[in-house]
Amino acid sequence: MSQQADIRYTISASRPSWPPRPRATGAPIVVVVLCDDLGFSDLGSYGSEIPTPELDTLASAGIRYRNFHAAPICSPTRASLLTGLNPHRAGFGRVASFDPGFPGYSMEVPAAAPTIASELRGAGYATFAVGKWHLAREIEQSAAGSRHGWPLQRGFDRFYGFLDGFTNFFHPHQLVSDNHHLSIAEHPPGYYLTDDLTEAACGMIRELRAADSEKPFFLYLAHGAVHAPLQAPDADIAPFVGTYDDGWDALRIQRFRRQMEMGLFPADSVLPDVGVDPEFAFPPWAELTADQRRLASRYMEVYAAMVATVDRSMGTLRRTLEA
């Protein structure tokens, strides 16, 4: 406990005092990795045919949850995740875009609503956000925006990523570093956003550890994958060519069978019908034309490759944490 200051006419006659600053010693590192639009069964540990060895290793050494409440759209879920509030209480009754002027749709986290980052930073943590933000109104995302809803104003020390709902994986339209936009005319050959975000996250960790070997940190790594656009490097797509030629009807049955074998659901569980809402139901695979089947198969091949790149990202992150 610091002693109380005694202020006199001169410094030499005064007694200094330094208010205590939070220092979280021995506190755990907290890492939250969010994948955009990922399906429940898209990981190997949840029945997928897509190889995800890194994530499967984590699952085998930890807990596989079976109950997550999503909004189920982007900004509302993110706002709830970071604040612990229901979407409307967090100001995001719908996807962040513009403020229609109604309660629950302000499209910014209320000043009175602390985030995980602000709470942990107040407890002595370093706080990093990397990837997709999508919690700021469009009018505030430009260089002339107020930045009120940007990550650094919501409790994060560092940010690297994009503020919008999605971007090009080979040439992002606008990347942001901390509180300013980056001017990038051309990315290097072989650039891929998922890999870039992963390296940015690992770089923040290394920089912190170079300066402080003990300070705990909170990392919020919100991948742009596997949200549209469907884009992945050719080398990552190649292993999945032909995997989905039998179509999604067969795929649903195969994944559900594996999930049952894993014990993810009660023994009397049955696979539900596809057509819950006719407006959103997809047609039986057999009803598609040959061209439609080829196109749909390609979509699934690229999507699977995107999942695989996220798994590779997790391996890179894990090795950085271990080091």
Image (cartoon, rainbow, N blue to C red):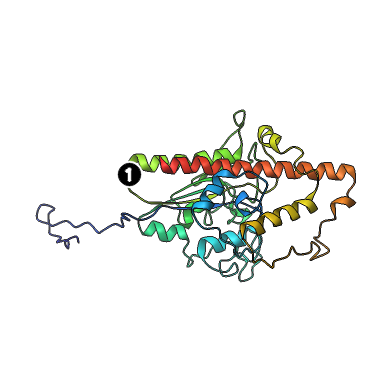
Q: In the picture provided, is 19 more to the left or to the right than 46?
A: left
* In front of the other: 272 or 18: 272
Q: Residue at x 79, y 66 (%)?
A: 276
Kind of residue at disc 1? Asp
Q: Nearer the viewer, residue 136 or 101?
A: 136
> Label 1 crowding class (10 Å Cα cut-off): few <14, some 14-19, many 20+?
few
What's the residue at 33%, 41% (across, down)? 211
Residue 105 sits above or below residue 57 on the image: below
Q: Position of residue 220 (x, y in %)?
A: 50, 52
Please state if 67 lies on the left or on the right of 252 as rendered: left
The quarter of the picture where residue 73 lies is bottom right
Q: Is residue 181 visible?
A: no
Quarter that holds the C terminus: top left
Quarter-wise, where is residue 207 in the image?
top left
In the rendered picture of this protein, how many numbered marks are placed on residues? 1
Local secondary structure at mark 1:
loop
> Badge 1 is on which residue?
212
In percent of the image, x 63 and y 43: which residue is there? 51
Residue 181: image location, x then y, percent: 55, 42
Above or below residue 213? Residue 31 is below
Left or right: residue 266 versus residue 84 is right
Q: Is residue 45 above or below residue 104?
A: above
Q: Position of residue 45 (x, y in %)?
A: 60, 52
Image quarter where the N terminus lies is bottom left
Residue farthest top in this picture = 189
Q: Position of residue 52 (x, y in %)?
A: 60, 45
Residue 189 seen: yes
What residue is shown at x 64% (from left), y 68% (from top)?
Answer: 101
